Amino acid sequence: MKATDIEERVKGLLCPILRKFNLELYDVEWLSAGRYNYLRIFIDKEGGVTIRDCELVSKEIGEILDREDFIEVSYYLEVSSPGLTRELKKPQHFMKSVGCLAKVVVKEDADRKELTGRILVADEEGVEFLLEGGEKKWYCYEDIIKAKLVYEEKSKGGKGI
């Protein structure tokens, strides 16, 4: 079974569990690293995820995955918050992060550039950043190689870029 097939099937199984606990799905990843396999589930909620939230989801999805038994290899199940410096992979991730500072790797022409900027606008097509130095720059999602939020202390949030 392909990684994307596993991820999609797990997403479908997670919906009722997450609804039950008032949580939202941030992402699901299937990773193979050498002889080890990992099913990583990232959950989120307003105000932040607790360890108890992760325990509840892990227990319920673990029981369902054992019963369904569609993953043919052994794996480690990990349920966690996406964290304060979460990766931004989907348009929804960027849209929920408007106003936040992000470190981004983009392709421009034949080059790769690493930028830091505040997310000003995000929609289904792309995202606009206010870069260090005050320049505004728009990128389509296909030009964003990698993006990750930058941790900011509350007292400093929203200041500067």
Image: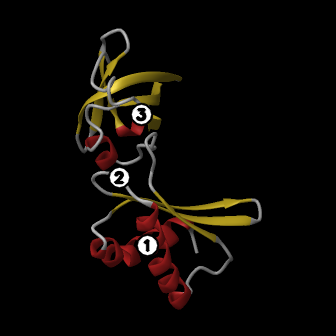
Q: CA distance from mark 3 to mark 2?
A: 30 Å
* Observer-nearest of 68 and 151: 151
Marker disc for residue 143: 3
Earlier along the polypeptide chain: callout 3 or callout 2? 2
Task: Work out how far the residue at label 2 is from the one at label 1, CA to CA, in angstroms.
Answer: 15 Å
Q: Nearer the viewer, residue 113 or 132?
A: 132
Residue 100 falls left or right of residue 74 = left
Q: Residue 109, can we see it?
A: no
Q: Residues within 10 Å of mark 1 (few under 14, many from 20)?
A: many
Colour basis: secondary structure
Q: Amino acid at mark 3?
A: Asp
Calculate the distance from the C-alpha at mark 3 to the C-alpha at mark 1.
Answer: 34 Å
Q: Is residue 83 visible?
A: yes
Which residue reaches farthest right? 35
Judged by depth in the image, the label closer to the viewer, 3 or 2, is 2
| Label 2, residues with CA under 10 Å away: few <14, some 14-19, many ≥20 | few
Identify the image quadrant of the C terminus: top left
Question: Which quarter of the rendered picture does the N terminus lie within?
Answer: bottom right
Question: Measured from the top left, where is residue 82 in percent x and y?
Answer: 45, 51
**Where residue 38 sits: x, y (%)?**
62, 65
In which image quadrant can residue 3 be found?
A: bottom right
Amino acid beneath label 2 = Gly
Circle 2: element type: loop
How far across and down, in percent of the image, does residue 96 sit? 27, 44
Badge 2 vs badge 1, beta-carbon distance below 8 Å: no
- Going from N to C along the chain, the mark reached first, 2 or 1, is 2
Q: Residue at x 50, y 22 (%)?
A: 113
- On the image, numbered disc 1 is attached to which residue? 57
